[in-house]
């Protein structure tokens, strides 16, 4: 092969390496920004009297270092590692950027997995569709476990 052909091949290889590195930097930037993917959210009706009087709470029971932290479900809570989530579990590496959401509708609370990698579990069973929550239910997201209270 001539020297000119080898030089062109070297530049092609170098260009491919730079394209690969650019793609890696772009994906890492998206992960660090934690940009959530917009989910189709049905419109919420006006809150009824019963939903205003008795709101739901999620209380962390595991890990022990976070035990007792409580979050009121005021309309909707998103749970994940992204900074834009209502409940940020940044130290739990098994949690997706935007992992799940808990929302109130007609005085009841519901749990929905938002396409997470490791799944969302309710009382030990994986959540595959929007599921109604009851007082005393245990929700596991990654290594974090919540108890539902009213």
Image (spheres, rainbow, N blue to C red):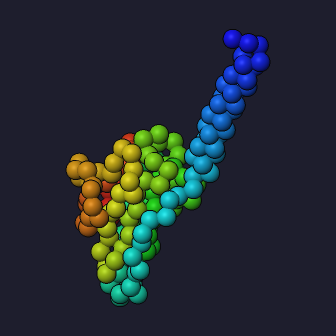
Name the residue at 25% across, 50% down: 126
User: Which of the pair 12/61 is nearer the observer?
Assistant: 12
User: Which of the pair 16/46 is nearer the observer?
Assistant: 16
Q: Is residue 29 above or below residue 15?
A: below
Q: Is residue 94 above or below residue 137?
A: above
Picture quadrant where residue 111 is located: bottom left
**Left or right side of 13 for 74:** left
Image location (x, y in percent) of residue 7: 75, 19
Name the residue at 22% across, 50% down: 125
Q: Is residue 33 above or below residue 104?
A: above
For the N terminus, the quadrant is top right
Q: Determine if residue 78 is in view.
A: yes
**Left or right side of 91 for 53:** left
Name the residue at 51% across, 42% down: 91
Image location (x, y in percent) of residue 149: 32, 64
Q: Determine if residue 133 is in view.
A: no
For the C terminus, the quadrant is bottom left
- Identify the residue at the far front of this view: 2
Image location (x, y in percent) of residue 13: 67, 25
**Left or right side of 100 for 90:** right
Q: Is residue 36 above or below residue 22?
A: below
Name the residue at 41% across, 80% down: 43
């Amino acid at each position: 092969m001539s020297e000119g052909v080898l030089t062109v091949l070297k530049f092609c290889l170098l260009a491919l390496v730079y394209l690969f590195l650019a793609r890696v930097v772009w994906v890492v930037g998206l992960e660090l920004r934690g940009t959530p993917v917009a989910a189709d959210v049905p419109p919420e009706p006006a809150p009824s009297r019963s939903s205003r009087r008795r709101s739901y709470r999620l209380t962390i029971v595991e890990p022990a270092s976070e035990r007792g932290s409580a979050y009121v479900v005021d309309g909707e809570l998103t749970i994940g590692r992204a900074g834009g989530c209502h409940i940020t579990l940044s130290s739990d590496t098994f949690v997706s950027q935007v992992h799940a959401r808990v929302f109130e509708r007609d005085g009841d609370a519901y749990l929905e997995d938002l396409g997470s990698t490791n799944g969302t579990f309710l009382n030990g069973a994986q959540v595959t569709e929007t599921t109604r929550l009851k007082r005393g239910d245990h929700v596991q997201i990654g290594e974090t476990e919540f108890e539902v209270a009213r």
